[in-house]
Amino acid sequence: MVHRREANGTEIVFGNQGALWGNAMTWWDTATGSIWSQPRGEAILGDRKGERLELLPSSLSTWADWQEAHPDTLALAVSSGADGFDVEVMAIVVELGPESAAFPVSELRETAVANGVVNDIPVAVVIEEGTDRWKVFSRQLDDTVVELEVVDGELHEVGGDRRFNLALGLALDGGDQSLDQLPGFTSFPRDYMTFFPEGEFWTQDGIITVESLQ
C-alpha cells in the first residue's frame, strides 16, 4: 500500500515505530513523534492523533509488464527474498471515503474479477490467473457503469464490445476510455475486521457484514 506523505498541507517524514497495532506495522513521524497505523494511514497516538494520509493507487506487476506500459521508468535495484505471506489466505481491501469492503482472494480465484460497489462507487477487483498480481478499477465510464469479466487474459465488458488490458486497465482495439485504477491493499481477514468493524466482505453469494461475524 502507498500513502501520500502529507497531512493538512504538511510533508511528513516517517520511521518504523517497531511495535504492532492490530497485528500490523506502526510508524512514527519525526516532527511530533506521533504513532501511525499503517493499514489505516492514521495517527493513533500523539499530537497528530486522528489525522489521516491519502491512500494512493499502487500496482503489483512484473517488471516486464510495467516496462511495456512505462518504458522510461527508473527502478531502485534491491535484493530481496520471497515474502512471508500467503496471498491465498488474505483479502484485498478497498476503502473509499467512510466505507470499505474486503474481497477474499480465495473467492477471487474462482471468479477472476469481482464486480462490487464501495461507498456508491462501482469497482472491479481483478486477480491475474496463476499469479499474485491484482488490481482495483473503477467500473464507471462517463455516464455508464460496466460489469466486467475476464476472457482470454483480457477484461471484457459483459454484454458489450469494450475490452481492457488486465494489468493496467488500458482500452484495447483503439478504444478511447480506459479504466481508472483505485487504491487497495491486502489484509488478513481478521485484521480487516479489527480495523474496519463496520466493513463488509464480498462473496460470490452476497455481502457479509463484519458485524454479523463478530
Image: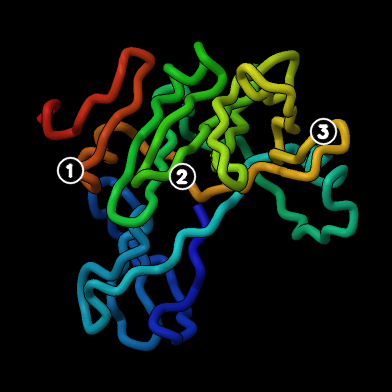
Q: Quadrant of residue 202?
A: top left
Q: Position of residue 120 (x, y in %)?
A: 37, 44
Q: Residue at x 29, y 48 (%)?
A: 99
Q: Residue at x 61, y 43 (%)?
A: 141
Say left or right for 196 vs 58.
left
At label 2, the amino acid type is Phe
**Badge 3 element:** loop
Residue 150 vertical position relative to residue 119 in the rendered view, above or below: above
Say left or right for 76 vs 98.
right
Q: Residue at x 52, y 14 (%)?
A: 111
Instruction: State if disc 1 and disc 2 touch (CB < 8 Å).
Output: no
Q: Quadrant of residue 136?
A: top right
Classify mark 3: residues with Cα within 10 Å, few (<14), some (14-19) or many (20+): some
User: Reading the chain from its start, which is encountered first: label 2 or label 3?
Assistant: 3
At label 3, the amino acid type is Leu
Q: Which residue is mark 1?
A: 197
User: Reading the chain from its start, which is encountered first: label 2 or label 1?
Assistant: 2
Numbered circle sitting on residue 185: 2
Q: Which residue is mark 3?
A: 172
Q: Residue at x 39, y 83 (%)?
A: 8
Residue 159 vertical position relative to residue 28 in the rendered view, above or below: above
In terms of depth relative to the viewer, which is nearer, 39 or 80? Answer: 39
The residue furthest front is: 143
Residue 137 in sight here: no
Nearest to the eye among marks 1 and 3: give it: 3
Classify mark 2: residues with Cα within 10 Å, few (<14), some (14-19) or many (20+): many
At label 1, the amino acid type is Pro
Q: Position of residue 183 (x, y in %)?
A: 51, 50
